[in-house]
Amino acid sequence: NDYFIGFNRASGVNSDNDEADDLVTIIQTGKNGLEYSLSQLKGYIGEGESFTIENFGGSGRDFVIYLSRIDKSSGPWRAMIKIGTDKAFMPTSSPTTAEPTQSPTAVELTPSPTPCPQGATLQVDVLTDKYPLETS
């Protein structure tokens, strides 16, 4: 099955949405996106929320989509999402503040991506429709 992640901005031609206004939507469909297939709205999330696809692709691992924020400061709004195979990138429920350190301090580098297990692949295609100035 294929999953599509979209930002359902309730503006212009989409101002009369019935569901998921200004939220990120998760859509599931089949046939690898190569031919017609029915699709299903699996869920939608707002800022600070996540959606989990359990046992993604039969891998035994969960796939997490997290909406960190919606940038409403300019032009078309933009949904800032994070995706991964665990929830390590999500904020904790209660933020913590560490004691200040003396400068300079070492900066920890971002860890390398974890390879997909046993030959599984993950493909992310970011596309827009034929009207990018209207909806992107």
Image (cartoon, helix red, strand yellow):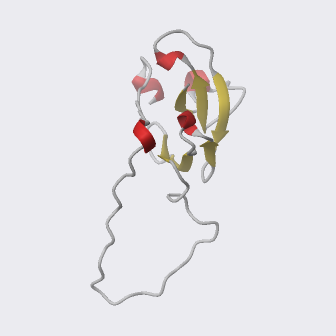
Q: Which residue occupies the extreme front position in the image? A: 118
Residue 97, percent from left and from top: 52, 79
Q: Quadrant of the C terminus?
A: top left
Q: Quadrant of the N terminus?
A: top right
Give the total number of marks visible in the rendering.
Answer: 0
Q: Which residue occupies the extreme top position in the image? A: 36
Residue 73 visible, this angle = yes
Pick whichever, 90 or 12, lies toward us. 90
Residue 51, percent from left and from top: 62, 44
Rendered view: 101 above or below 119: below
Q: Residue at horizontal 40%, vertical 37%?
A: 119
Rendered view: 85 above or below 36: below
Q: Which residue occupies the extreme left position in the image? A: 104
Q: Residue at horizontal 54%, vertical 9%?
A: 36
Residue 114, percent from left and from top: 39, 51
- The picture quadrant where one finds residue 3 is top right
Pick whichever, 7 or 77, lies toward us. 7
Pick whichever, 40 or 19, lies toward us. 40
Residue 10 visible, this angle = no
- The picture quadrant where one finds residue 52 is top right
Rendered view: 50 above or below 92: above
Q: Residue at horizontal 27%, vertical 84%?
A: 104
Q: Residue at horizontal 58%, vertical 45%?
A: 62
Residue 89, percent from left and from top: 50, 58
| Residue 131 falls left or right of residue 5 | left
Q: Which residue occupies the extreme right position in the image? A: 18
